[in-house]
Amino acid sequence: MKLSLNQATVKRASVPEVVDVCVRNGIPAVGLWRDPVAEYGLERTAALVASAGLEVSSLCRGGFFTGLDQRLDDNRRAIDETAALGGSSVLVLVPGGVPDRDLVAARARVASALEVLAPYAEAAGVRLALEPMHPMFCADRGVVSTLAQALDLAEPYPSSVVGVVVDALHVWWDPALAVEVKRAGPRIHSYQVCDWVTPLPADVLLGRGLPGDGHIDLVGLTSLVTDAGYTGYVEVEVFNEDVWARPYDSVAADLVRRHESGWKPVVDGGHDRLPVTP
């Protein structure tokens, strides 16, 4: 499984900077975000990535369907942007939270948005990847909390059009993980890794650690994903202030080493270096 660097892992890097980092460190793909792509220019970004010999593993992000307007026009634009960038043509969809305390209605709006957007994505040659999110994000980001829920939403559509993101942070805790990853099979459109570190920071969104620094069995999860038939990129997506403060090349080189080791835990003095909760 080849490595991809999600732009969020070097959050302050511009599009040209993240492309250069990938090239210098031998990383063959990049996961891009819409805001920095818009800042640099969509056509310029597509040309730059192609000229560097990189592939776009995914574009983040569309979704946030659960508000009353469902952001359908913005999601159509996101689909068009994904198509223009080429590469794997995967658009990551974050479902959205609960705007009005009606969780059932919020989840229903995710389903109704897919009804509208799936045909549009299919016509554009874009794969929609719905991202189930850890339950702690249900209120503000992700009313789809499990792979089972995401797969149920994707099931009415061809697997080549609507699939899921397997993001280690969001799914590692799920007792049904092995069953649901196997069920996902060709619907796994993106595989993202980071680690669950403790204690979590006050802003839990920034509680992602580098692969190997936390509690997730990434070796086991990667085996589940490959056994399910996934042959795409493993994309490292880390939201962490300490990581963002490091030089970009230092982070990239560290990730290459960890990837080559098979995401084995970092060892310090003969013991796995796992943070201990006070």
Image (tube, helix red, strand yellow):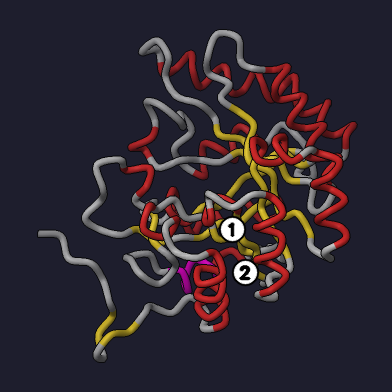
At horizontal 28% and vertical 85% (from top left) the residue drawn is: 268
Query: As drawn, is 154 to the left or to the right of 278?
Result: right
Can you give x and y, in whole percent of width and height, for residue 221 in the image? 49, 66
At horizontal 40% and vertical 12% (from top left) the residue drawn is: 102
Q: Is residue 180 visible?
A: no
Structural crowding at the residue carrying mark 2, measured as other residues with C-alpha within 10 Å and reported as few (<14), some (14–19) or many (≥20): few
Camera-nearest residue between 73 and 143: 73
Q: Quadrant of residue 141?
A: top left
Secondary structure at numbered mark 1: helix
Considering the whole magenta stretch, tell me its main secondary structure: helix
Camera-nearest residue between 256 and 251: 251
Query: As drawn, is 270 to the left or to the right of 209?
Result: left
At horizontal 51% and vertical 22% (from top left) the residue drawn is: 107
Q: Amino acid at mark 2?
A: Asp
Q: Is residue 218 visible?
A: yes
Secondary structure at numbered mark 2: helix
- Residue for badge 2: 227
Q: Amino acid at mark 1?
A: Lys
Structural crowding at the residue carrying mark 1, measured as other residues with C-alpha within 10 Å and reported as few (<14), some (14–19) or many (≥20): some
- Find out whether the residues at labels 2 and 1 contact each other: C-beta distance under 8 Å: yes
Q: Which residues are magenta?
A: 218-223
- Residue for badge 1: 182
Inspect the magenta stretch and tell me whether residue 51 lies in it: no
Is 140 drawn above or below residue 259 in the view shown?
above
At horizontal 51% and vertical 72% (from top left) the residue drawn is: 250
Can you give x and y, in whole percent of width and height, for residue 264 in the image? 43, 79
Query: As drawn, is 29 to the left or to the right of 234?
Result: right
Quarter of the image that includes the C terminus: bottom left
Can you give x and y, in whole percent of width and height, for residue 148 in the image? 51, 42
Camera-nearest residue between 252 and 145: 252
